[in-house]
Image (cartoon, rainbow, N blue to C red):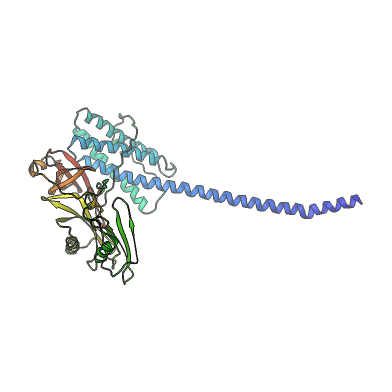
């Protein structure tokens, strides 16, 4: 009897428990396999994204490197010269850092890494010469011209590949990239000073002061702010309202036009001044308009500014997007453009109506100023500009040199070998205060 029970138990184990255990094992193995595949896919995606990010930043760094080398061709101030050389050294270090994150199987980083390192080392060597009181030789200038051209070729190649999604890319190798810099300069360490791409014209990002100096007047309540906002937005009523207490305390309103377009507007609690107005355009026009249309858009924006009490404003830079023109206006005093006092205005390209405005920079910076007459004549200041710059226009401009300090300068716009630059010469000391590169895009001009 005992034998029969044992045999029966064995059959149960064989026919039920063992298969069940096998099923559990198979399911567990499948689950584990699925987890491992998911984990592997996650690691693969993470690595791919890191590589793409590194390649994207490498393209940006190469563009910045070429820009800095280009500025060296028109710089005359010893101070600006050293700052630009220091920038080149810093950017080359950033390029090397990005290259270290790119798999060598996808990009022949060795050749490119060596070239970029030598560019940085060469700039550092020139910095030491400048600090020792030595001026750049003709050979140095020729070498810098070669480096500018080489970097342009590399940047174009990398950006062309990025634009068509060719990431990872094929190898980039060329012996001529290596012969442009002498081998005698030792490797140096990177520094952490980063440039800023400025989209709205020179100095537009320099006005984030600790306090809004242009916000003055009596306190207004919600009812008064609503009345002002309704008039500015040209709308019968708002859907919602509230307030915010940032650097500029304000009343905020949101509404909807009859055609479904939404609008947001903010009015300062002090003085009842416009901070922000934003809606959308009615049309979809794109590209840079012809000269006559540009003037019409500028006039529409200028008339609107004048109606809001903003007098003595001058259009400086503009960008053109789908349906709208974004025009930047700066305050003018004593024939000098005050770049800190900036207002952006969005104009509907179809109706010429105002669909947006941003007065924050103006509200942060605008105060009564006593702008002195220039000590130097325009001709004396022009003599301080590099002979390599073919000057096309000039005017006075008050520019920021620190967040709280401004200097009166002569603004010279011109070209060097087809590249456009803006050079600022101090109207009192003759010192070269700043240089910008003008970048022409399909949407308008940018400065770097």
Image location of residue 193, percent across then percent down: 31, 39
Image location of residue 41, percent across then percent down: 52, 50
Residue 240 picture quarter: bottom left
Q: Nearer the viewer, residue 186 or 131?
A: 131
Residue found farthest to the top: 132
- Is any part of residue 112 visible from this angle? no
Total of numbered circles in the picture?
0
Residue 424 picture quarter: top left
Q: Nearer the viewer, residue 211 or 94?
A: 211
In the displayed structure image, the side of residue 436 where residue 157 appears, left or right? right
Q: Nearer the viewer, residue 336 or 3?
A: 336
From what the image shows, is residue 278 above or below residue 145?
below
Image location of residue 445, percent across then percent down: 23, 54
Residue found farthest to the right: 1
Residue found farthest to the bottom: 258
From what the image shows, is residue 109 above or below residue 184?
below
Image location of residue 224, percent across then percent down: 26, 62
From what the image shows, is residue 92 above or below residue 259?
above
Q: Nearer the viewer, residue 67 or 433?
A: 433
At 25% from the left and 68% from the top, the residue drawn is 234
- Is any part of residue 189 visible from this angle? yes
């Amino acid at each position: 009897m005992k034998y029969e029970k044992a045999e029966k138990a064995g059959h149960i184990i064989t026919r039920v428990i063992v298969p069940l255990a096998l099923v559990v094992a198979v399911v567990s193995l499948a689950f584990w396999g699925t987890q491992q595949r998911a984990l592997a896919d996650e690691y693969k995606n993470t690595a791919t994204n890191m590589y793409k990010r590194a390649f994207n930043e490498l393209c940006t760094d190469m563009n910045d490197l070429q820009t800095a080398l280009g500025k060296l061709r028109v710089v005359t101030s010893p101070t600006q010269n050293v700052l630009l050389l220091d920038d080149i050294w810093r950017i080359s270090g950033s390029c090397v850092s990005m290259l270290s994150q790119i798999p060598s199987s996808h990009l022949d980083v060795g050749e490119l890494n060596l070239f970029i390192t030598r560019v940085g080392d060469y700039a550092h060597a020139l910095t030491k010469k400048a600090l020792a009181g030595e001026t750049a030789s003709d050979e140095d200038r020729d070498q810098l011209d070669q480096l500018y051209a080489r970097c342009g070729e590399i940047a174009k190649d990398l950006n062309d590949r990025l634009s068509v999604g060719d990431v990872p890319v094929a190898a980039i190798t060329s012996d001529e990239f290596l012969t442009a810099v002498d081998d005698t300069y030792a490797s140096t360490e990177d520094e952490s000073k980063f440039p800023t791409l400025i989209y709205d014209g020179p100095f537009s990002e320099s006005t984030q002061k600790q306090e809004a100096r242009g916000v003055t007047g009596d306190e207004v309540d919600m009812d008064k702010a609503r009345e002002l906002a309704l008039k500015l937005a040209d709308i019968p009523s708002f859907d919602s309202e509230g307030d915010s207490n940032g650097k500029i305390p304000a009343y905020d309103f949101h509404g909807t036009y009859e055609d479904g377009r939404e609008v947001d507007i903010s009015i300062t609690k002090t003085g009842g001044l416009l901070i922000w107005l934003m809606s959308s355009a009615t049309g979809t026009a794109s590209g840079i308009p012809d000269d006559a249309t540009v003037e019409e858009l500028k006039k529409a924006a200028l008339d609107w500014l004048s109606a809001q009490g903003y007098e003595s404003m001058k259009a400086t830079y503009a960008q053109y997007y789908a349906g709208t023109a974004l025009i930047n206006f700066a305050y003018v005093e004593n024939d000098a453009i005050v770049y800190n006092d900036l207002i952006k205005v969005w104009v509907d390209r179809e109706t010429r109506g105002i669909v947006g405005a941003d007065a924050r920079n103006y509200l942060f910076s605008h105060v009564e100023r006593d702008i002195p007459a220039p000590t130097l004549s325009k001709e004396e200041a022009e003599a301080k500009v590099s002979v390599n710059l073919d000057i096309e226009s000039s005017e006075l401009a008050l520019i920021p040199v620190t967040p709280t300090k401004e200097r009166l300068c002569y603004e010279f716009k011109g070209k060097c070998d087809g590249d456009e630059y803006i050079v600022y010469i101090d109207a009192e000391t003759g010192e070269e205060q700043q240089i910008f590169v003008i970048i022409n895009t399909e949407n308008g001009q940018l400065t770097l």
